[in-house]
């Protein structure tokens, strides 16, 4: 069965770096894009961007340009989200989600369980 | 950016009641609209894509409709397990944007 399994919760200080993993299984990793979504505590969903799993090319939403980086380890069917120079406002749960094909409207059809990142001094 | 205005923000419905949630896009999104359900403490799950196509395994009491800038999702006969927050999302143009969410509870 298709699964996206994310790494565990993180507690970081401002200015530090965090790297979250998202391991895919049950499908061919490079056949589908991978997206990242932020959910601040008690808030809605915010699309951060996506990475082309064939080419490794990332696309970032404007609010996530600069300190955020998507990457891949294709041999391990794993996508990563790295956040540098962490700020208090980065405290959130981060989800990876598989991007479906154009025929299915590029919907996000499978989601990881989420990784909680807490930034506090 | 395309703004997605979702309403209502919260709603309480009785078991068996029909529930309708709407999303209005700031411009035509040409049916590129999905609906997600998020239960408390869980990750979102895809319910509907392309505005009106039901995802495999989703109960048939869920349905989607709409076109242009106006879309809606209906739950025929609300069930206790439908208690959740629902989000619409457009994928017509980057950045993809979500509605603010509708928190649906049992009355």
Image: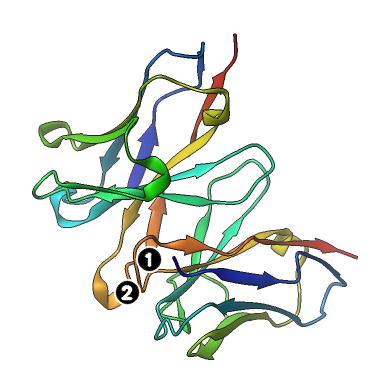
Q: Is residue A102 visible?
A: yes
Residue drawn at (32%, 67%), measured in percent from left and top? A106
Residue furthest bottom in the image? B67
Residue drawn at (59%, 79%), measured in percent from left and top? B24
Res. A107 mark: 1
Determine the CA span between mark 1 and mark 2: 6 Å
Q: Is residue B43 above or below residue B34?
A: above
- Quadrant for the C terminus of chain A, please: top right
Which x, y percent locates residue A110? Answer: 39, 54
Which x, y percent locates residue B99? Answer: 58, 64
Which x, y percent locates residue A107? Answer: 38, 66
**Camera-side residue of A84 and B55:** A84
Res. B68 mark: none
Secondary structure of the residue carrying numbered label 2: helix
Q: Is residue B7 left or right of residue B89?
A: right
**Camera-side residue of A81 and B64:** A81
Res. A104 mark: 2
**Camera-side residue of A67 and B84:** A67
Q: Is residue B8 left or right of residue B48?
A: right
Q: Is residue A35 left or right of residue B38?
A: left
Q: Is residue A96 left or right of residue A28?
A: right
Secondary structure of the residue carrying numbered label 1: loop
């Amino acid at each position: 069965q298709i699964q996206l399994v994310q790494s565990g919760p993180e507690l970081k200080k401002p200015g530090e770096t965090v790297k979250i993993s998202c391991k895919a299984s049950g499908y061919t990793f490079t056949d589908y894009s991978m997206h990242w979504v932020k959910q601040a505590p008690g808030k809605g969903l915010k699309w951060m961007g996506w990475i082309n799993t064939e080419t490794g090319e990332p696309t970032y939403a404007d609010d996530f340009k600069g300190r955020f980086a998507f990457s891949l380890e294709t041999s391990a069917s794993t996508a990563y989200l790295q956040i540098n120079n962490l700020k208090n406002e980065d405290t959130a749960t981060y989800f990876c989600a598989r991007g479906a094909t154009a025929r299915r409207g590029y919907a996000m059809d499978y989601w990881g369980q989420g990784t909680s990142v807490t930034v506090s001094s | 950016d395309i703004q997605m205005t979702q309403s209502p923000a919260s709603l309480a419905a009785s078991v068996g009641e029909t529930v309708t949630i709407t999303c209005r896009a700031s411009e035509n999104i040409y049916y590129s609209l999905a609906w997600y359900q998020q239960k408390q403490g869980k990750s979102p799950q895809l319910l509907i894509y392309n505005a009106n196509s039901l995802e495999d395994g989703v109960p048939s009491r869920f349905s989607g409709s709409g076109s242009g800038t106006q879309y809606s999702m209906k739950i025929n006969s609300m069930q206790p397990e439908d208690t959740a927050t629902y989000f619409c999302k457009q994928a017509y143009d980057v950045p993809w944007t979500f509605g603010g969410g509708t928190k649906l509870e049992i009355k």
